[in-house]
């Protein structure tokens, strides 16, 4: 959900050092041009069908139940398969499940599995593997709540699996695309250390700074377009980008806005961006003073210029926010019917005085110690000061910010939220009264009713009306400000094709990539 940034040089193993050569390592570290030998080495790599993907940061866990970072999900996505995928527009795409039907009452989902699918050990994919995988997902870890509404997972006719729900959920198929839900072999042991998947690539070697994967020639979806896929893990995004500039790697995913802007004009690269639903949530705690007063919440809104913040911190990439988690990518449900109030610091001062704060407010703004989030905090502090809201910025290391429940307890904070394929996930996670991460501590009966309705109705028109009402209420009296929705980035060498950057970059597929 969050990015890691530092200025350390890229980490390389002795094996990588010998493979790239001294000049190659210097190029990766400093961003200088390669010599003739290194240029020849890059050309040879391209001819042999090797695709090297650089990441800033290495996986911490590769157990699908607990994996979350882009680097972890990308590894799993290459080795395993999901039942259903999502594309760059967050639309459902068949994967192991070639098709599905839903019962008239919306409680039974029958998925037909692809035939001829084999695990890397040569064994056949069976319905029992799917059942075993989802029993594991339902019983423990961060997915237990996600699948708590599943009454049973059972074998259907032929090669099909049947999910029966306790209550209707119009987003259930999207739940099956969850990042954790790769299909494992029934009874798998040493999960996270041994990798027997059905995916397009087979793990050959794994070290702390690299993963080497070979194309699965018998992949049920067709042989991959490259013979070898290599993930190289650097200590920083800067190191990964310098390796791309030096010709040591072919692809970099998940870069910051300023770096991406610097690469967009270089003809040697194909710089790809995609709008997401990911956002930075600025929230005021609403269950105690001063945020329990609707006038105070509206004063913060009046003191904020979202367009200026978007241009200053996002360099125009992404989209301006409207103080609810409905990104323009959710085109079916996104609404601009309710206008945002224009910035008016004087009106904000008057509301604060009316609420009992004639001298304004002094508050501490807590924020993860990441450059782009600190920049957002600084922009907000400058704008809010004109309205009499004086802010002390308190940057914290991510481990400290998220420790225990510290981030949930403070009065004013900025929390990064990664993209999700449907808006209901955000509502269930942080907006309804009993949400596990309701960091604003906001409880609104009307909002709760609308969230429950939208999360259960099978009438899409009714759901759309509920979502539009939620957006209206958030602008009128909500405790959060969402100044923008950010973009995801990928930068590819000009000789790489067949890759489309996914909104959650870890779900970017390399199966069709060619060099």
Image (cartoon, grey):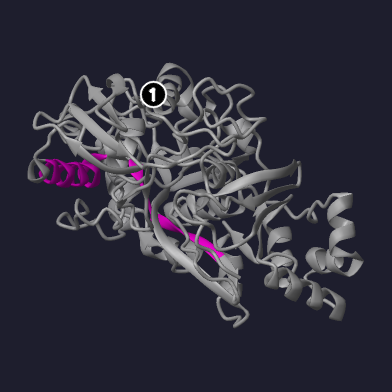
Q: Residue 382, how many percent across, how many down?
A: 49, 56
Of residues 298 and 186, the one drawn nearer to the viewer in this rendering: 186
In the depicted structure, whether residue 347 falls above or below residue 136: below
Q: Is residue 196 shown left or right of residue 14?
A: left
Of residues 41 and 148, the one drawn nearer to the viewer in this rendering: 41
Q: Is residue 33 visible?
A: no
Q: Which residue is mark 1?
A: 131
Disc 1: CA contacts within 10 A as few (<14), some (14-19) or many (>=20):
many
> Which residue is drawn at the image coordinates 49% and 67% (left, top)?
498
In the depicted structure, whether residue 215 falls above or below residue 456: below
The picture quadrant where one finds residue 453 is: top left
> Which residue is drawn at the image coordinates 41% and 47% (left, top)?
419
Q: Is residue 431 visible?
A: yes
> Which residue is drawn at the image coordinates 46% and 53% (left, top)?
380
Q: Residue 166, how many percent across, how many down?
A: 21, 19
> Which residue is drawn at the image coordinates 88% and 69% (left, top)?
23
Q: Residue 433, how many percent across, how many down?
A: 28, 25
Which span of residues is magenta-colored?
463-490
Q: Is residue 188 shown left or right of residue 456?
A: right
Q: Quadrant of the C terminus?
A: bottom right
The local secondary structure at tag 1 comes to helix
Q: Is residue 433 shown left or right of residue 389?
A: left
Q: Is 376 covered by the magenta stretch?
A: no
Q: Residue 362, how many percent across, how many down?
A: 48, 39
The picture quadrant where one finds residue 321 is: bottom left
Of residues 296 and 118, the one drawn nearer to the viewer in this rendering: 118
Q: Is residue 402 shown left or right of residue 212?
A: left
The tally of labels here is 1
């Amino acid at each position: 959900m969050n990015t890691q940034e530092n200025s350390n040089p890229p980490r390389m193993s002795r094996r990588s050092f010998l493979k790239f050569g001294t000049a190659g390592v210097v190029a990766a570290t400093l961003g200088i041009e390669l010599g003739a030998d290194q240029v020849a080495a890059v050309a040879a790599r391209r001819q042999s069908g090797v695709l090297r993907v650089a990441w800033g940061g290495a996986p911490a866990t590769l157990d699908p139940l607990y994996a979350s970072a882009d680097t972890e999900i990308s590894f799993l996505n290459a080795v395993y398969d999901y039942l259903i995928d999502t594309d760059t527009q967050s639309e459902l795409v068949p994967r192991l499940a070639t098709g599905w039907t839903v019962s008239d009452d919306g409680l039974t989902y029958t998925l037909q599995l692809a035939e001829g699918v084999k695990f890397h050990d040569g064994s056949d994919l069976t319905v029992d593997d799917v059942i075993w995988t989802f029993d594991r997902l339902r019983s423990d870890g961060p997915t237990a709540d996600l699948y708590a509404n599943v009454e049973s997972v059972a074998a259907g006719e032929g090669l099909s699996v049947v999910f029966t729900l306790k209550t209707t959920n119009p987003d259930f198929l999207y739940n099956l695309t969850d990042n954790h839900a790769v299909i494992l072999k029934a009874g798998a042991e040493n999960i996270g250390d041994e990798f027997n998947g059905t995916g397009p690539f087979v793990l050959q070697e794994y070290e702390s700074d690299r993963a080497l994967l070979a194309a699965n020639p018998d992949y049920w979806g067709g042989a991959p377009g490259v013979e070898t896929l290599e993930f190289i893990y650097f200590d920083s995004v800067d190191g990964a980008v310098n390796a791309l500039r030096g010709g040591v790697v072919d692809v970099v995913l998940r870069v910051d806005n300023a770096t991406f802007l610097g690469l967009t004009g270089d003809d040697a690269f194909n710089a790809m961006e995609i709008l997401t639903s990911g956002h930075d949530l600025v929230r005021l705690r609403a269950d105690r003073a001063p945020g329990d007063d609707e006038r105070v919440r509206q004063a913060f809104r009046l003191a904020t210029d979202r367009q200026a913040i978007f241009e200053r911190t996002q360099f125009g990439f992404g989209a301006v926010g409207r103080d609810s988690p409905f990104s323009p990518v959710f085109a079916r449900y996104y609404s601009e019917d309710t206008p945002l109030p224009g910035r008016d610091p004087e009106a904000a001062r008057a509301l604060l005085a009316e609420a009992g704060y004639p001298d304004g407010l002094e508050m501490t703004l807590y924020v993860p110690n990441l450059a782009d989030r600190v920049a957002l905090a600084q922009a907000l502090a400058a704008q809010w000061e004109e309205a009499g809201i004086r802010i002390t910025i308190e940057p914290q290391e991510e481990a400290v910010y998220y420790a225990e429940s510290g981030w949930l307890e403070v009065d004013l904070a900025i929390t990064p939220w990664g993209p999700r394929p449907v808006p209901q996930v955000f509502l269930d996670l942080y907006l309804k009264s009993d949400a596990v991460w309701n960091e604003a501590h906001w409880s609104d009966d009307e909002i709760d009713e609308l969230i429950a309705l939208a999360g259960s109705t099978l009438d899409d028109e009714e759901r759309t009306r509920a979502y539009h009402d939620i957006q209206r209420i958030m602008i009128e009296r909500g405790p959060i400000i969402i100044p923008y929705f950010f973009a995801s980035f990928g930068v590819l060498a000009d000789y790489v094709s067949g890759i489309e950057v996914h909104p959650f970059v870890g779900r970017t597929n390399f199966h069709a990539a060619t060099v």
